[in-house]
Amino acid sequence: MVRLKSKKSFTLVEMLIAALIMAITLCGILSLYVSCIDLVSTAKNTSIATNASQGLIDQIRNTSFTQIVDNYDGLNFSVNSMPDNRGVVYIDDTNPELLRVTISISWQQKNRVIGADKNLNGILDAGEAGTNGIIDSPVQLVTLIANR
C-alpha cells in the first residue's frame, strides 16, 4: 500500500487575511512617510526664518542705539526665500538704557499658517495674540541691547 503525503498550503481565507494585514501596514507606513515630508518642510522653513531673524538682529545691533526704536519698532518684513510669510519687529523701550528686541516670523505652509499671524499682514489683529500683546510664532527671537 502506497501512502500519499498530504500537501500543505494556504487557504483562500488565510490569503485574504494576510493581504488585509499587509494593506493596513502599508497604509500606516505611507501615512508616516507623508508626515515626515511635512516635518522636513517645517524644519526647512523654521531654519530659513531663524537665519533671517538672526541677520536682522545683527543689523539692528549695528545701528546706533538712539535710532533703533525709530528705524525698527513695528517694522514689517518678509523673507525672500520663503513663500507667503510675514515678520514683525517689536521693541520694548520702557528702560531707556536697555532695549528688548523681539522678532517674530509667521508663514503659510500648505493649508495652515505657522505662527499667530493668521492673515499674514504683520499687524496684531483680534484673536491673533496671546496675553503678551505681540504676534507669537515658533520662530521668535528675543535679544537685549544695552546703550553703550
Image: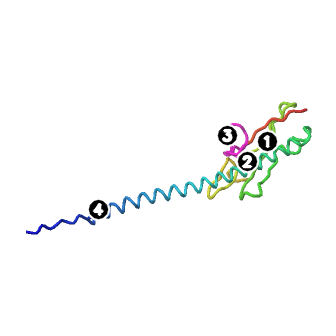
Callout 4: SS: helix
**Residue that carries the numbered disc 3 in the rendered image:** 130
**Camera-nearest label, 1 or 3:** 1
What's the CA distance linking mark 2 and mark 3?
21 Å
Instruction: Provide residue 71's location: percent of width, then percent of height.
Output: 88, 45
Amino acid carrying mark 1 in the image: Tyr
What's the CA distance linking mark 1 and mark 3?
15 Å
Instruction: Provide residue 125's location: percent of width, then percent of height.
Output: 71, 47
What's the CA distance linking mark 2 and mark 4?
54 Å
**Camera-nearest label, 4 or 1:** 4
**Residue that carries the numbered disc 4 in the rendered image:** 14
Residue 142 quadrant: top right
Amino acid carrying mark 4 in the image: Glu
The magenta stretch spans residue 126? yes
What's the CA distance linking mark 3 and mark 4?
56 Å
Q: Earlier in the sequence, mark 3 or mark 4?
A: 4
**Residue drawn at x 72%, y 53% as measured from the top left:** 120
Residue 42 sits above or below residue 101 on the image? below
Give residue 90's mark: 1
Callout 2: SS: helix
Callout 3: SS: loop
Give residue 50's mark: 2
Name the magenta segment's main secondary structure. loop
Q: Residue furthest left?
A: 1
Amino acid carrying mark 3 in the image: Gly
Instruction: Provide residue 103's location: percent of width, then percent of height.
Output: 76, 44
Q: Earlier in the sequence, mark 2 or mark 3?
A: 2
Q: Residues within 10 Å of mark 1 (few under 14, many from 20)?
A: some
**Residue drawn at x 7%, y 69% as measured from the top left:** 1
**Camera-nearest label, 1 or 2:** 2
Depth check: give the residue in front, 53 or 68: 53
**Residue drawn at x 81%, y 43% as measured from the top left:** 57
